[in-house]
Amino acid sequence: MFCCTSQVGLSREDLVASLADRAGPERVRLLGASDLEATIDALADAFQKDPLSLWLAGLAEDHPDRGELMLRTNRWVSGGMATISLKKCRGVLLGVKEEEEEVDGKGLPLAGAMVAVPSSGIAHLDNVLHWIMYCIRNGSPFPKEGYGEFSYQRFGAMNVLTAKRTQHMSPYPDHIYICQVGVRGASQGRGLGGRMFRTMFGATDSLGVPVYLETESRENEAMYRHLGFETVDTLTLKAKGDTSPDAEFEMYCMLRLPVGAPP
């Protein structure tokens, strides 16, 4: 996760230009720095019951502050991904709302968001210095009592995902990495995630570049297969010294080639 290479690959300008032509019909829009907090809010809510988020936090199911602590950790993780992607990686944020109409003169909050980085900026996402500075400004992801004994080690164990991504995407110097995508709990099951993916796929198919992401659970894997991804690898996350019953966590590395690309 923490290496830095020369900046090569698909540029943000090319991705933005392609997305700008496709965002409107699905009520999906490109977001900017002024939308950063709204993006973090939407993603933090979206991952409240996410299996990977729960595994990282290691909170007891009966912990009285479980919801609050999960939301705090989700904000830290999503904030890091969105902030570093937008400000350092020259990535893009997409957002979707339930409706376009305003309520009481104010726009509705984002119902979902996507954080994506073009290959030219991925080295910055993996740069340890950016994350150190983020920690200095925003504290620790697990600052209070109640988190699992191995939360920090589990977070560090995710570095293997970066090595796998580098390996799998080496044949594709131009590509898109979807860091995070999620829909608020109250808005899930209404096709909003599909709107963001269709917008992104319209752009990546036009550019002729593949899309890569990681996910967890067989249900998510099946959903992404339905969207055109294939599973290129599975791996097990485990923190050194962790002997708890849920020590091992399975992840799926998935790739979607652009429509019309040779197999």
Image: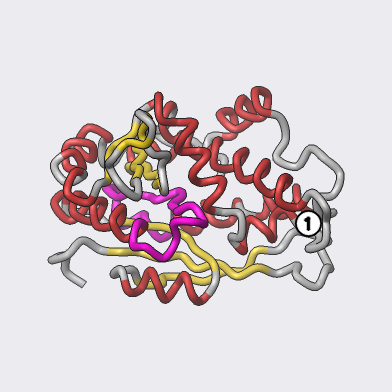
- Given residues 195 and 11, the one toward you in this image is 195
Point 68% across, 59% down: residue:
54
Q: Is residue 39 magenta?
A: no
Image quarter (top left, top right, bottom left or bottom right) of the N terminus: top right
- Given residues 198 and 187, the one toward you in this image is 187
- Given residues 48 and 79, the one toward you in this image is 48
Point 49% across, 44% down: residue:
42
Point 25% across, 47% down: residue:
27
Point 34% across, 57% down: residue:
192
Q: What stretch is highlighted in magenta?
A: 166-192
| Relative vertical location of residue 53 with respect to residue 237 in this rendering, above or below | above
Total numbered labels placed on residues in the image? 1
Give the residue type at disc 1.
Answer: Leu
Picture coordinates of residue 143, whole percent (x, y): 79, 37
Picture coordinates of residue 25, whole percent (x, y): 17, 49
- Given residues 154 and 164, the one toward you in this image is 154
Q: Residues within 10 Å of mark 1 (few under 14, many from 20)?
A: many
Picture coordinates of residue 78, whole percent (x, y): 54, 42
| Relative vertical location of residue 133 with respect to residue 74 in this rendering, above or below | above
Q: In which quarter of the image is residue 2?
A: top right
Q: Is residue 82 left or right of residue 171?
A: right
Q: Is residue 187 magenta?
A: yes
Q: Is residue 145 left or right of residue 230?
A: right
Image quarter (top left, top right, bottom left or bottom right) of the C terminus: bottom left
Q: What element carries label 1?
A: loop
Q: Quadrant of residue 256?
A: bottom left
Q: Mark 1 points at which residue?
A: 59
| Relative vertical location of residue 105 with respect to residue 28 in this rendering, above or below | above
Task: Single out the residue that lies furthest toward the front.
Answer: 104
